[in-house]
Amino acid sequence: MISKFAEKKVLIVVRTYPVPARKGVEVSCTAGITENGQWIRIFPIPYRLLDQDKRFRKYQWIKVSAKKATDDRPESYEIRQDSIEILGDPLPSKNYWEARKDILFPHREHCLCCLKQKRDKAGFPTLGLFRPGKIKRLLIAPDVPTWTNQQRQILEQADLFTEQPKTSLEKVPYRFQYEFRCDEKTCAGHTLICTDWEMGQSWRKWSRQYQSEWKKKFQQKYETEMIHKNDTHFFVGTLRGHPHTWIIVGLFYPKNTMQK
């Protein structure tokens, strides 16, 4: 059966740091929740190449024309980029964490172990949100410092009908991973890479502002505060080519008002 495009209303909750992609020059993993309460992954989203009036923000409702992608993951949908319509401002700034919780928490899973069991048994979900039982630490490890020749060629592709970004996509030369345990007796612990857009942007800003001292600022926010100050949750998803591999694609971190 051939999928047809249909209109969908989506609250955007996840956007990862962009990477070179053959079909989209550079794309971000973008995900959200539909007005019917279903997780959805939409692509291609070459965010920096979108017209200004289509550059949506996180926690903003958008309307798109979408159809089921050939991607085996049930939540994956292909969209028409020119169909993106932003529906008003992001969720209100006053008490915004509560407004976000009202939408997100009904879809929250108990833990990553539970998500894995469900996916392994039924093939879905491949997207989810949960609160880790205990975050042990944030690992910061050197990564390949520059794009490969193939990736660089992709980024240099010119589209005569699309205005190109003023700056080239910067490679983040570090890999960020969280070590944590689920609130589950049988959990042996997990180490997941985090590709959240905000983390990448923080590195870009603070590596310039603080230079050799950037890690202190980075760890203060993404380790110390995530562990001791915030009620930290992880948005997670599986990789298309590696269906059993999960990564953290986004962070949700309202202030902690209860003991975890």
Image: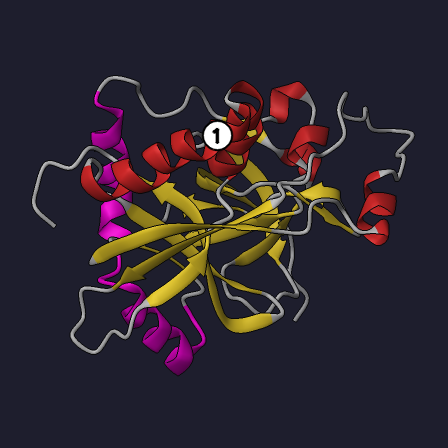
Residue 260 position within the rendered picture, expressed as x and y whole percent measured from the top left: 12, 50
Q: Nearer the viewer, residue 145 or 72?
A: 145
Q: Which residues are magenta?
A: 95-124
Spot occupied by residue 227 in the image (x, y as percentages of width and height): 24, 44
Percent position (x, y) of residue 44? Answer: 67, 46
Mark 1 nearby-residue class (10 Å; few <14, some 14–19, many ≥20) = some
Q: Position of residue 144 (x, y in %)?
A: 68, 51
Q: Is residue 104 magenta?
A: yes
Residue 219 falls left or right of residue 30? left
Look at the image and name its color scheme.
secondary structure
Seen from this angle, which residue lies furthest bottom? 121
Q: Tell me which residue sits at (53%, 33%) in the image.
A: 203
Q: Is residue 34 visible?
A: no
Quarter of the image containing the N terminus? bottom right
User: Which residue lies at the image location 42% right of the left edge and 70% below the top edge?
Assistant: 124
Left or right: where does residue 107 sit relative to residue 6?
A: left
Going by the picture, which residue comes out furthest to the left?
Answer: 259
Q: Nearer the viewer, residue 104 or 173?
A: 173
The residue tagged with tag 1: helix, strand or loop?
helix
- Tell me the amino acid under the disc marked 1: Trp
Would you say the magenta stretch is mainly helix, strand or loop?
helix
Snapshot quadrant of residue 152: top right
Asked where in the image residue 35 lies, by quadrant, the reply is: top left
Q: Is residue 131 visible?
A: yes
Query: Image point 90% across, 35% down: which residue?
Result: 158
- For label 1, the residue is 214
Q: Is residue 116 magenta?
A: yes
In the drawing, does residue 16 fall left or right of residue 121?
A: right
Between 170 and 74, the one lying in front of the other is 170
Decide: is 8 above or below 75. above
Q: Is residue 6 above or below residue 62?
A: below
